């Protein structure tokens, strides 16, 4: 029997033929349309209820912290405030600013009017995240969410001694994550690295960001501590801990979705200027990873525990990701693509392992999970011999 000759696949198509890529795109389009056709009062009630709960939790926690010299009040208020900040940033702010709820035509919950408890101004974040990140997902040099523009994220990048400090730098970034996001949105790293002066437009954006940062710092570290009177020190500490908790949690969630072993990265020369929707879908699928867990975990991650589904359908209501995830996984299985999903502890460990591995010269530290190229080739060979997916 003659062995089946299989061409080496390009990384951005996962080994699929052009016909398979387009069929895959049609299947995912159908899933998306089903959600669009079924959006309604149940979804609107979900986001309105969540916004109400988040605001009550924040107000209640800040009220408790007025008596923050009491240890029990300090613990309860700090924990509640941290959860409120996480909900505001993840499940509410991130998703509202994506336009996931614009279909409601509610001016109070709309991407054009929403402002969040975050240093990065909403309009600047939408440009950097919605327009750049989601268009050029995991393309080295184009997507700042991939290593935040400061880390080595792929073996193909030339190793330099400065990368040895990237594990420490990644930890610092995690601690000040909201400020890091604001800097990435302004492309400050590019300006410093290239020794470029800021354009008038960038200077105007910087001015807006600094004004937002002053308001955030004034609220958390001046106003609310002052309202606590003699308990101002403990209230200030509570706000600092709540912000730190939110930053570490958000950073971990983003790392899990973009950076574990097995998640593909792409070079700029691999990007087709005439990329079809099906091809774009495949690139999102190969460049994302999920976190498996409970409904509570999904809520606290802003449903970015379904990062694969979010990258494929960034404008669908986040509460629907858990419903469509099994359908999306079936598409992965039928087309022989690896669906990267693990518990959070394993994904965080894998992402940090990759940060350390890529801080060293190639080959110094083995991958925790080899890329699934060989299994995918075998599945593709089987699919070629059998009837192709419908």
Image (spheres, rainbow, N blue to C red):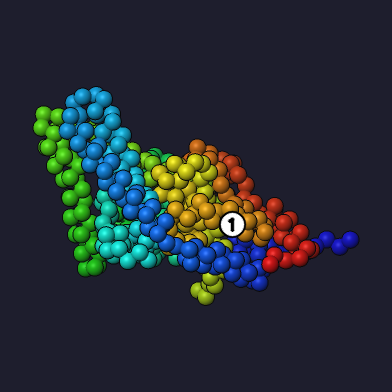
From the viewer's side, name the closer residue of 153 and 303.
303
The residue at 76%/65% (across/down) is 387
In the picture as drawn, the residue positioned furthest to the bottom comes out as: 274
Can you give x and y, in whole percent of width and height, for residue 110 in the image?
31, 62
From the viewer's side, name the closer residue of 31 and 7.
31
Question: Does residue 385 show up?
Answer: yes
In the displayed structure image, the side of residue 144 where residue 375 appears, left or right? right
From the viewer's side, name the closer residue of 240 and 206.
240
The residue at 20%/42% (across/down) is 220
The residue at 58%/41% (across/down) is 368
Question: Does residue 155 show up?
Answer: no
What is the tally of numbered marks visible in this picture? 1
Within the image, what quadrant is residue 11 found in? bottom right
Can you give x and y, in whole percent of width and height, for residue 299 in the image?
42, 46
Q: In this rendering, is residue 14 above or below 231?
A: below
Can you give x and y, in whole percent of width and height, for residue 229 in the image?
10, 32
Q: In this rendering, is residue 10 above or below 345?
A: below
The residue at 31%/34% (across/down) is 79
Within the image, what quadrant is residue 99 found in? bottom left
Q: In the picture, which quadrant includes the N terminus?
A: bottom right
In the picture as drawn, the residue positioned furthest to the top comes out as: 71
Within the image, what quadrant is residue 95 found in? bottom left
In the picture as drawn, the residue positioned furthest to the front comes out as: 41
In the displayed structure image, the side of residue 275 where residue 228 appears, left or right? left
Q: Look at mark 1 in the image and give the residue it sits on.
A: 327
**Crowding near pointer 1: few (<14 within 10 Å), some, many (20+)?**
some
Q: In the picture, which quadrant includes the C terminus?
A: bottom right
In the displayed structure image, the side of residue 56 where residue 279 appears, left or right? right
Can you give x and y, in whole percent of width and height, for residue 96 in the image?
35, 58
In the displayed structure image, the side of residue 10 where residue 348 appears, left or right? left
Is disc 1 placed on a helix, strand or loop? helix
């Amino acid at each position: 029997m003659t062995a089946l000759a299989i061409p080496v696949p390009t990384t951005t198509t996962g080994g699929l033929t052009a016909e398979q890529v387009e069929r895959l795109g049609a299947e995912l389009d159908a899933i998306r349309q089903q959600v669009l056709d079924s959006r309604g009062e149940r979804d609107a009630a979900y986001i309105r209820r969540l916004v109400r709960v988040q605001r009550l939790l924040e107000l209640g926690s800040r009220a408790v912290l007025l008596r923050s010299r009491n240890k029990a009040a300090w613990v309860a208020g700090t924990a509640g405030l941290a959860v409120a900040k996480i909900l505001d940033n993840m499940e509410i702010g991130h998703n509202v600013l994506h336009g996931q709820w614009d279909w409601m035509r509610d001016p109070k919950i709309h991407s054009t009017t929403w402002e969040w408890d975050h240093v990065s101004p909403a309009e600047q974040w939408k440009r950097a995240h919605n327009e750049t990140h989601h268009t050029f997902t995991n393309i080295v040099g184009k997507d700042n969410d991939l290593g935040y523009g400061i880390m080595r994220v792929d073996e193909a990048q030339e190793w330099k001694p400065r990368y040895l400090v990237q594990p420490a730098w990644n930890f610092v970034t995690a601690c000040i994550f909201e400020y890091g996001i604001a800097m990435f949105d302004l492309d400050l790293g590019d300006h410093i690295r290239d020794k470029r002066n800021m354009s008038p437009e960038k200077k105007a954006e910087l001015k807006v960001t600094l004004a937002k940062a002053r308001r955030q710092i004034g609220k958390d570290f001046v106003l609310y501590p002052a309202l606590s009177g003699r308990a101002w020190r403990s209230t200030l500490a509570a706000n600092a801990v709540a912000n730190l908790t939110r930053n570490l949690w958000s950073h971990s969630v983003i790392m899990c979705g973009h950076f574990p072993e097995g998640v593909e990265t792409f070079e700029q020369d691999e990007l087709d200027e005439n990329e079809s929707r099906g091809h774009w879908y495949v690139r999102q699928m190969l460049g994302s990873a999920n976190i498996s867990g409970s409904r509570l975990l999904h809520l606290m991650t802003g449903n970015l525990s379904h990062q694969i589904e979010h990258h494929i359908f960034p404008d669908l209501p986040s509460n629907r990701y858990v419903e469509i995830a099994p359908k999306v996984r079936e598409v992965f299985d039928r087309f022989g693509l690896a669906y990267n999903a693990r518990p959070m502890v394993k994904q965080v460990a894998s992402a940090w392992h990759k940060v350390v591995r890529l801080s060293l010269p190639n080959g110094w530290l083995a991958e925790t999970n080899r890329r699934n190229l060989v299994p995918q080739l075998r599945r593709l060979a089987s699919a070629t011999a059998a009837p192709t997916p419908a």
